[in-house]
């Protein structure tokens, strides 16, 4: 795991506040460019935070539908800012492309057709109190954001606690990192929840839709297409989960008022 000082940089700045000028230093998040090679072909370059490259690469390939299963991956090699992946692809029609993007404005996406047939649990129930508790833990875990204000966060949780947490300058990358770690570490997603700091747009929701996850909770807003997609594939989508406030946009039957969360 990279140390904190490998993810941030101290820079001199001039600050104006209440009519006064002062010279001091500030902490800013570092950017790196990660190139992903699949079967000796350069597939994509991503602007990201400089950590957990293997999770990001695997999460990207799987959440974009380029690889259908972790079982297709035969080897993963990291060389400086490159991840080299060898895989036996089920999809033989993949067209390789090179794109640089941070995902913050218009993320890199492949295979946009909606062919999501994941089975989801509808007997997975959460109380509003549990949602608020998980989001409080989520916000307290965002150390890089507290220091720099320049990253997004994503997490995978069960109905008790956060299991996997990552931060990245891109909300897409943060999600891919947590999904990639789950896939590489054989953590089942069937009874899990995704927590997000950023806006849930359709391409974010589609990444989750390619997993078995049933609930997505964001601190921020959602888009109309994300709601339509969540409704179609059976995902409960929550936005503006802040304190005791929660907006439920799709499949609200999973959110119930009861004292104890039920599991299956």
Image (cartoon, rainbow, N blue to C red):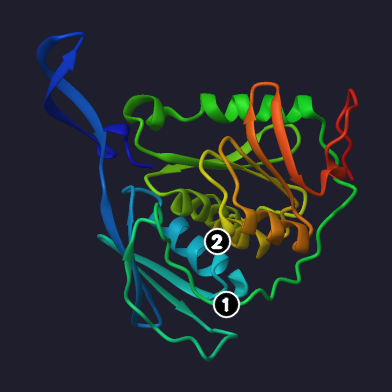
Image location of residue 214, percent across then percent down: 75, 52
Circle 1 Cα neighbour tier, 10 Å, few/some/many (<14 / 14–19 / ≥20): few
Q: Which of marks 1 and 2 is nearer the N terminus?
A: 1
Figure quadrant of the C terminus: top right
The vertical placement of 246 against 203, above or below, is above
Classify 94 as above or below 161.
below
Find disc 2 in the rendering and name its residue.
203
Give the residue drawn at x 65%, y 32%: 241
Side of 23 relative to 177 (left or right): left
In the picture, residue 211 is in which quadrant?
A: bottom right
Query: Residue 16: horizontal and vertical position, in percent?
Result: 16, 16
Q: Is residue 58 left or right of residue 23?
A: right
Q: Mark 1 points at which residue?
A: 72
For the question of whether residue 211 can be seen, the reply is no
Helix, strand or loop at mark 1 = helix
Identity of the residue drawn at 37% across and 67% down: 77
For label 2, the SS is helix
Q: Residue 105 at x, y = what percent? A: 39, 55
Q: Residue at x 57, y 77 (%)?
A: 72
Q: Is 224 or 168 nearer to us in this picture?
A: 224
* The label number, if any, that marks residue 192 in the structure image: none
**Residue shown at the point (52%, 91%) measured from the top left:** 93
Q: Quadrant of the N terminus?
A: top left
């Amino acid at each position: 795991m990279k140390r904190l000082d490998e993810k941030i940089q101290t820079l001199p700045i001039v600050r104006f506040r209440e009519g006064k000028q002062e010279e001091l230093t500030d902490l800013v998040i570092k950017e790196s460019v990660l190139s992903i090679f699949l079967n000796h072909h350069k597939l994509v370059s991503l602007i990201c935070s400089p950590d957990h490259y293997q999770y990001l690469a695997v999460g990207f390939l799987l959440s974009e539908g380029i690889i259908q299963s972790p079982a297709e991956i035969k080897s993963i090699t990291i060389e400086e800012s490159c991840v080299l992946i060898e895989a036996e692809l089920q999809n033989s029609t993949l067209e390789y492309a090179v794109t640089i993007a941070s995902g913050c404005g218009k993320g890199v996406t492949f295979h946009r057709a909606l062919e999501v047939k994941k089975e989801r649990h509808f007997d997975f129930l959460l109380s509003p109190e549990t949602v608020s508790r998980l989001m409080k833990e989520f916000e307290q875990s965002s150390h890089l954001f507290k220091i720099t204000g320049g990253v997004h966060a994503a997490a995978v949780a069960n109905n008790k606690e956060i299991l996997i947490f990552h931060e990245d300058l891109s909300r897409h990358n943060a999600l891919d990192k947590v999904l990639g770690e789950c896939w590489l570490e054989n953590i089942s997603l069937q009874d899990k929840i995704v927590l997000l700091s950023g806006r849930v747009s359709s391409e974010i929701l589609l990444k989750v839709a390619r997993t078995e996850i049933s609930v997505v909770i964001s601190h921020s807003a959602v888009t109309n297409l994300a709601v339509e997609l969540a409704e179609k594939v059976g995902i409960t989508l929550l936005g503006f989960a802040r304190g005791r406030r929660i907006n439920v946009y799709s499949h609200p039957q999973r959110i119930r008022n009861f004292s104890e969360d039920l599991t299956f």
